[in-house]
Image: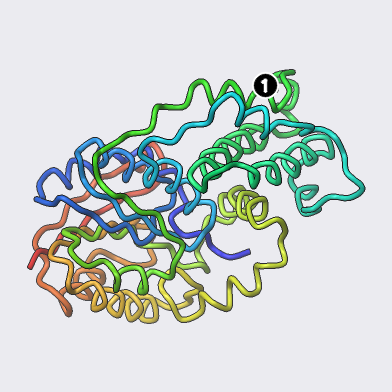
Amino acid sequence: MSNLHGAQINRNGWLGFELSVLRRLTFHSVALPFTGEPNLGLYLKHWKVRVAANDRSQWAWIKATALIENNSETLTEDDLEMLLDDAYVPRAEFINPSLLDWFNETDAWWFDNMRENAERLESPLKQACALALGMTVGDYVMSFDGATAGLRSPLSLSRVFRRLHQAAPVPIDNLQRNQSTNQEAREFLAERHHTDLLFLRLPPATSRRDKANARRLAWREEWLRRGNDFWPEFERRSAGKMGGRVETRQQYLNLLEDLLHTAAHIPSWAIENLSDGFISNEELSEAITRVRKVDAIYSKDFSELSGARTSIITAVT
């Protein structure tokens, strides 16, 4: 199971820190090569910023499509009826039997059927909205374990889906053509012409990933891809690239420097580093300086909340 970069930690706790740094910069468009959860890009839409979101993980790509690329599409009552049609009815066999690794049989049938029903929606944006809601339902189910299963609501997953849909925010129309892509980071950045800012959340080294959280998020990837046989190819295609398996600091820094050379045409950079002891701010600053002069370093200690400290390094041409 590969590292699903951008997903290794819940970053909601320091969204305010990220925004406080970005307020110091002047930009009207941003590129996010490792988006993970789409909270930052979604918030930047409130600032009327044009957002280009990217992630090699399909779960992050789908979420960004629903919440960042999408400016207006919503699910109608007819759409909900289609999505939940016979959601609990077993077929002759599972389309995605790997769901049984994550859920009990009844819940697994719901996710298998709902995933297939989403393909019947009329537009990719509506499909993304449905799948993003489905991920939220799955996260709800996965939040219970043997000790807390009795606290789970007796509502069916279809009822939970409807309630989450009712509580979902209205799409933000920032009057911009936002994008969500599922590319390797270098390819994505090479295509970001006329972009003002690179916001780069450094992916963790795979060898140091939060294994429990990576496993928690892996169900989303297997649900969307309808199985788990893709992992070897996913790993192979990530080898030797930022966001793939890394064992040494120097290898990581070399990959980072190569990525920054690819992004040299973007005027402003903001590079965020989760200080977990693998790469220090000093090593990171040196790597950035070999490509562009560092402008400022901002740090915030979240150790009391998450045991982590994060820093954002800015560099402007």
Q: Amino acid at mark 1?
A: Arg
Q: Is residue 103 above or below residue 245?
A: above
Q: Residue at x 17, y 78 (%)?
A: 291
Left or right: residue 50 versus residue 111 is left
Left or right: residue 42 versus residue 129 is left
Quadrant housing residue 2: bottom right
The residue at which mark 1 appears reads as: 159
Residue extending furthest toward the front = 122
Q: Secondary structure at mark 1?
A: helix
Residue 132 x/y as whole percent: 54, 41
Q: Is residue 165 above or below residue 90?
A: above
Quadrant of the rendering where the C terminus is positioned: bottom left
Residue 51 x/y as whole percent: 28, 50
Quadrant housing residue 234: bottom right
Quadrant housing residue 277: bottom left
Q: Residue at x 65, y 73 (%)?
A: 232
